[in-house]
Amino acid sequence: MFKIAIPAVAALGLIAFAAQSKPTVSDVQTGVAPMGWHLSHEGTMAKLAYGVANSDQLALMLTCERGQSQAVVYGDVQPASPRLINASTAVFAIDPLSGGLAEETRIPLAAPAMQQLVRQGKLPVDGEAGRFELTATSRERSLIGAFFAYCGTDRV
């Protein structure tokens, strides 16, 4: 009986030890970076994005050229506004967030939803999860104001 019991107990001990082994460094996540508002410039284009800094993880991106009164909208969520304009033509542009084909959407910077963003730091959006708000900290609100100023709106 001991001839069978000793190897069985040893095997169970090895299995228990293997199940308790520590994860490797690649298995441990260092934490999830928070999402927020970020402003950048690429040539003459200003980009205001809501997502993780320095990554492709973006929920929404607004772009404009200096002096424009409308912003181009990209992303998984869209501003909740009846003033959203579907401006796509037969030729679809490449969505800079997903790399796939995207319909171009524009919104006037004077739209109430956009004015709520610049004045109160809150943007109501629609997405797959329904309607919710993207909010901005006081530091992020200054970035939003800079975006609106660059785009040339006088309604800040």
Image (tube, grey):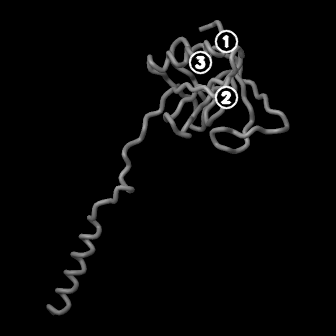
**How many other residues sit within 10 Å of disc 1, few (<14), some (14-19) or many (≥20)?**
some
Mark 2, residue position: 73
Q: Residue most toward the right?
A: 90
Disc 2 packing (10 Å; few <14; some 14–19; many ≥20) = many
> For numbered disc 1, what is the local secondary structure?
loop
Question: Residue 148: horizontal and vertical position, in percent?
Answer: 61, 15
The amino acid on which the numbered mark 3 sits, given as a three-letter code, is Phe
Q: Amino acid at mark 2?
A: Val
Identify the residue shown where x is 25% and y is 71%: 16
3D distance between C-alphas at marks 2 and 1: 17 Å
Residue 26 appears at what percent x and percent y? 39, 56
Give the alpha-carbon distance from disc 3 to disc 2, as whole Å.
14 Å
Instruction: Determine which quarter of the picture holds residue 96.
Output: top right
- How many marks on residues? 3
The quadrant of the rendering that contains the N terminus is bottom left
For discs 2 and 1, the disc positioned in front in the rendered view: 1
Task: Estimate the x, y position of residue 18 in percent, counting from the top left.
Answer: 28, 70
Tell me the tag on residue 152. Answer: 1
Which quarter of the image is occupied by the C terminus? Answer: top right
Could you say which disc has been placed on residue 147 in the image?
Answer: 3
- Residue at 48% x, 29% y is 36
Is 129 positioned to the left or the right of 106 in the image? left
Circle 2 SS class: strand
The image quadrant of residue 114 is top right
The disc, 3 or 2, on the residue closer to the chain's N-terminal end is: 2
Among the 4 quarters of the image, the one containing residue 124: top right
Residue sitting at the far front: 43
